Amino acid sequence: MMTSKDRKNLEEELKSLRPEDIFRPLDDVVANAPPLYPLWGYFFFRKCVTSLVGDPGISKTTLGYSMFHSLSNGEPFLGIKPEEPINVLYMDFESSDSLVASRHQLVINDKSPNFILYNIVDYYLPQIATLLVQYCKDYDINMIVIDNQSMAFNTRDENDNSEAKREMKFIRSIAIACNAGVLIYHHPSKSNMPGTRKGSGAFARARLADVMINLDYAVEGNEDVIMLQTVKNRMTDEKVVWYINKTGGKFVFCDMPTDIDIPKQATNTYIYQAQEKILEMLKNGNQYKAVDIIREISNKEITEYIIVNALNKLRQHRRVSQPKYGYYGKV
């Protein structure tokens, strides 16, 4: 809720604005907009809020520890490399030191110097926000994980849209202030609804997230294979469905189970591999025709269709330029 001091500050700020400061031609916005800053795949971007929804016990936390251990060491996870060095602050509002150490032994077998942990349950997220922002700025933290949302805020009523909006607005302010991506864990509704309605409580949480990912067991009774499905992605138009085998704390892609009753969808990372190859090819500063890029990097898995798709997405993200018709270059 806005205080009288906040209102006064806002009034003073508005007095200093000129109309042209806030009303801008679309062409100017497009010409001067910075590119998107992806951190990993189509899921994590700087200043982006990603929501991960899954049942208790489906391995959200184990997945997070394994994922960010790899990414914080500059290693690929599920075959996808981080776009830049990941310095992660993992805010675990449920795990004691002993449980953290046990999970570490299960999923991690070496050091994690860029993996910073917060697991003090005495405070809620808003109480330590100032310290959080300062730490992230001082140590160049570019990924913040909040595990989980209701514990981080001591949510009183998950069905209260006003409370949900305040929480999501607060999380977005943290992402912007820290210039970091934020991943929030959230539990599903008791009715276990599909799509963006899967998360429990008020719909504002899904509505105000940039990216929403659902985790489900692929087949009832089989806890080894989980389905990762992107049900919302306002950063890109890519909505993947992946099947992941989790055994002994390790996560690897697997084929769609034969007894699952849904249409087969993409379960590979070839488009990411194509993007990496394109960006590597353009590093020398030269400009290439699309046909030259296709000839250079295509193979049995990375087809012409995948390469054209990858080029279009890189252009959409303003990560490659088109200095003249039919040519691509580095931004």
Image (cartoon, rainbow, N blue to C red):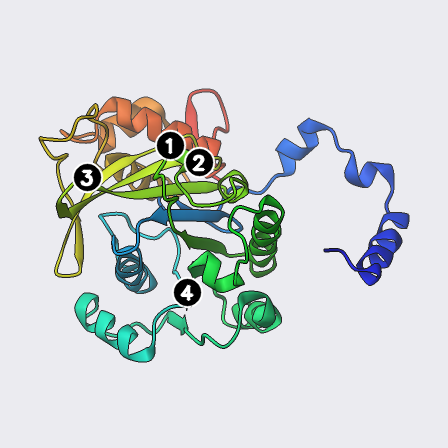
Q: CA distance from mark 3 to mark 2?
A: 21 Å
Of residue 202 and residue 65, the one placed in the foreground of this image is: 202
Sequence-wise, the earlier of marks 3 and 2 is 3
Given this view, does label 3 or label 2 mark the residue nearer the observer?
3
First-in-chain label (3 vs 1): 3
> Where is mark 2, residue-wise?
233
Label 2 element class: strand
Where is 75 relative to 34, above or below? Answer: below
Q: Position of residue 34 (x, y in %)?
A: 58, 43
Closer to the camera: disc 3 or disc 4?
Answer: 3
Give the residue drawn at x 55%, y 41%: 204
Q: CA distance from mark 4 to mark 2?
A: 23 Å
Q: Is residue 142 visible?
A: no
Q: Amino acid at mark 3?
A: Ala
Task: Residue 153: give its label.
Answer: none
- In the rendered view of the protein, which quadrant contains the N terminus? bottom right
Q: Callout 1, which amino acid?
A: Glu
Q: Residues within 10 Å of mark 2 (few under 14, many from 20)?
A: some
Query: Which sits in the foreground, 3 or 18?
Result: 3
Question: Which residue is located at x 58 percent, y 44 percent?
Answer: 161
- Frontmost of labels 4 and 2 is 2
Residue under pointer 1: 238
Q: Is residue 251 left or right of residue 290?
A: left
Left or right of 232, for residue 298? left
Query: What residue is disc 4 on?
Result: 87
The alpha-carbon separation of the residues under discs 2 and 1 comes to: 7 Å
Q: Please, what is the three-letter code of the amino acid marked with disc 4?
A: Asn
What residue is disc 3 on? 218
Pointers 2 and 1 in contact (C-beta within 8 Å): yes
Q: Secondary structure at mark 4?
A: loop
